[in-house]
Structures are given as structure tokens and as C-alpha cells.
Image (spheres, helix red, strand yellow):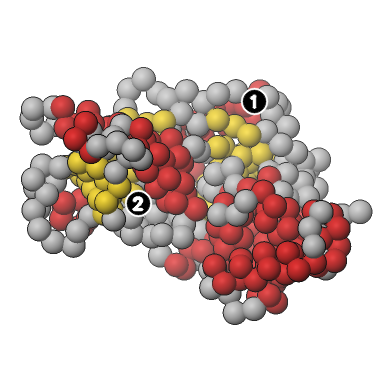
Amino acid sequence: MVLYPKGGSAVKGILFYVYHPNQGSYWLDGAYRGIVSEARCGCDVMRELPVSGGLDGAPVILLGGSAEAAESVRQRGGRPILADAAKPLGLYGVSSVTFELEESIRLCLDRLTDAGRQRIALLGLNPNGGDAVKLRAFPEKKDVFAAKESLTECVEAFVKERARDYDAVICANDTTAIRLLAELDRFGIRTPDELWVIGMGNSLLGAALPTPLTSVSFDYTELGRASVRLCRALVREPVDVTVSFCLPCSLAVRATAPLSDRSMAPKPNAPKPRPPYRGGGRRYFDGAEPILLIESILEGSDAIDRELLLLLAEGAGCETIAERLYLTDRAVRYRISKLIAKYGLPHRAALEAALRAALPKRKE
């Protein structure tokens, strides 16, 4: 794909490439939208990374890229830029853009402590993923619970054996937090009366829960925009340099942890590069697939479809949904069928099953 600005010429901007290996992930899709938007604004030419051939010094944005992808770009004469929501600055020795995860964890700890929460756990770290950054910010390693096998098993064991030892939990991501809230409800542990919960990712699904989730918010679109701005900066440099910076996060305060909302500013000095780590596999998310599916569907839907999905999760039929959303019954059925086809589901029952698993009914 070649992207040229609407009504303009490509000669005023730069040429850069994008490597986007995992279409369908909501954070990657958000970052990609930011790349496209910023490229149009700057009259830049954006191309998908070709599988072979020289790159002639052009910058290459690697969305969620690996060490192998970065090295391949180098060998072909390109200048790799790692754009990732979780990986440390300077990873693989290449330019990078990421979020200030370490500082976000510290500030969550500060806010919880200010609110009188003293026994705080960090739950659901992926030992094979990018969560080493979050781990560095947590002072008490005995209060860290990593998903050694699957995320579901980690959460179930924590709630059964250790949840009552704590008064607050910071979750490695919103998927962990959503699973945790469901398990806490099953064991009769009330949130936030007995346990405060904070997620990371500020997902639409977390905000739609019966007890809406407090969560650290990442602007994935800005991650994409910042990556393009870094491309321009590198093109202006006469020598090959490595530039890395991180983006600030914010806290979306909701019912699961009634904290004071404060901006999370980035640290003035970037951390030193860390050794490469292996990417996480499918095993980590075993049992959490409905949460990931529904979040992707919500992120890719318009406001009407989001309301429709939330009503469908409540068990509402097409007639009730049509009445609530001021649509015809036929329009509701058409929208449902489009969602089923778009996300490759076999039938409506599969969509409803995923909704029930990811989003519990609200209590009367």
C-alpha cells in the first residue's frame, strides 16, 4: 500500500515504511491509525515494508516488532524504529517510542498509598513478554504474581489463596483486571469495599463492566503519530543515530479504585537499554480469549454497535435493542450479522457466548 496525502503531492514529505505483523490487535490498529493520520498531515509517503530489497536508509516503523525484524531492517539498509506499548526504551539498540510504564506503576503505588492502601499486589505479569518494565517499578517482589502458565490459572489461584491478604491490586493489563473482577465476584469479595483494582490499557470493555474499571490509559493513536515524527527527525540527521523517547500516560478513575486523577508525566531521563527478551506466546492468554475478542470488536465498532453489543450482553433480544436504540428490528439484525462476518464468527450464538464470558450481566 502507498499512502499519499489527500489533494497533495508526496514531494514535500519523507518516505518511510511500516511493518505491521498483527492486524486485528486493537492497540496495533490504533497505532496504525495514528501513523496514517500523521503521514497525511505531513505530506509523507508511507509504504508497507516489502519482503525483500534494499531500503536506502529509509526509516521503518516496526509495530510490535521483534529483534529479528529490527536486524533484518538494518541488514537491508533501513533505520528501524520500534513502536510498542510495552517494550523498554532502546530495546535491540534501535530508535523507539513507547509509554512510560515504569513511572505509571510507581505513580499508581503512590496514589494507592495516599488513599490508605498499604497491602498492594501486582498481578498477571507475562514472564515471556514486555512486563519486565513493570516489574522493575514494584518494590516488593513477594507481592508480584506472574502468570507462569496461563493468565486464567494465575488469577484463579490468586483469588482463591491470596486475595484477602491485600487491599489493592495493580493488574498488568485490563485483561487480567477483567478476569480478576469476575473471580472476585464469584468468591464474594467486594470491589471496591474490600479490594481496589487498577488495570492497564483503559479498554472499552473495562469501562463497560458493572463495576467500571479504573485503569491506566495509553493513547495508542499518539504512539503512531509520534513514530512518524521520529521518522522525520531521523531523516534530518546526517549520521545514523539512535533516538528513543516515551509518552506519558493518564489515569482513568472509575469505581474499582476511587483515586484522585493525576497526569502521569514521563521521567526526564530514559533508562538504559535492556537485554532482549522473548515475546509472549498464546499460552499466557489461555482462557481469556473472549475478553480479547470483545475488546477488539468494541474498538472497531461505532457508537451504535457498541451500545448494541452491551445490550446483547445483557440478554436483550432484537426487538428490545431496536426499541432502545431507535432502530428497526431489521437494522439490528443487519448490524449483528455484519459484526459476525467481520470478526469471522460462525454464528450469532458464538458472539453472544463471547459477550457473556467477557461482560457479566449487571446486578439489579
Q: Quadrant of residue 223?
A: top left
Amino acid at the residue labelled 2: Gly
Question: Secondary structure under badge 2?
Answer: loop
Instruction: Quickly name the residue at label 2.
Output: 64
Residue in the image at 67% along x and 48% along y: 303
As helix, strand or loop, the secondary structure at mark 1 comes to loop
Mark 2 or mark 1, which is nearer the start of the sequence? 2
Q: Residue at x 11, y 49 (%)?
A: 55
Residue depicted at 23% across the width and 33% down the height: 13
Q: Where does residue 19 sit, x and y in percent of width and height?
A: 28, 53
Along the viewing direction, whichever of 18 and 118 lies nearer the viewer: 18
Q: Nearer the viewer, residue 247 or 178?
A: 247
State left or right for residue 2 relative to residue 281.
left
| Coordinates of residue 142 in the picture (x, y in percent) | 53, 45
Task: Count up the numbered dots.
Answer: 2
Asked whether the residues under the numbered discs 1 and 2 touch, taking CB atoms below 8 Å apart as contact, a structural biologist would say no
Give residue 52's mark.
none
Front label number (1 vs 2): 2
Q: Amino acid at mark 1?
A: Asp
Screen quadrant of the C terminus: bottom right
Q: Residue at x 72, y 41 (%)?
A: 256
Q: Is residue 175 visible?
A: no
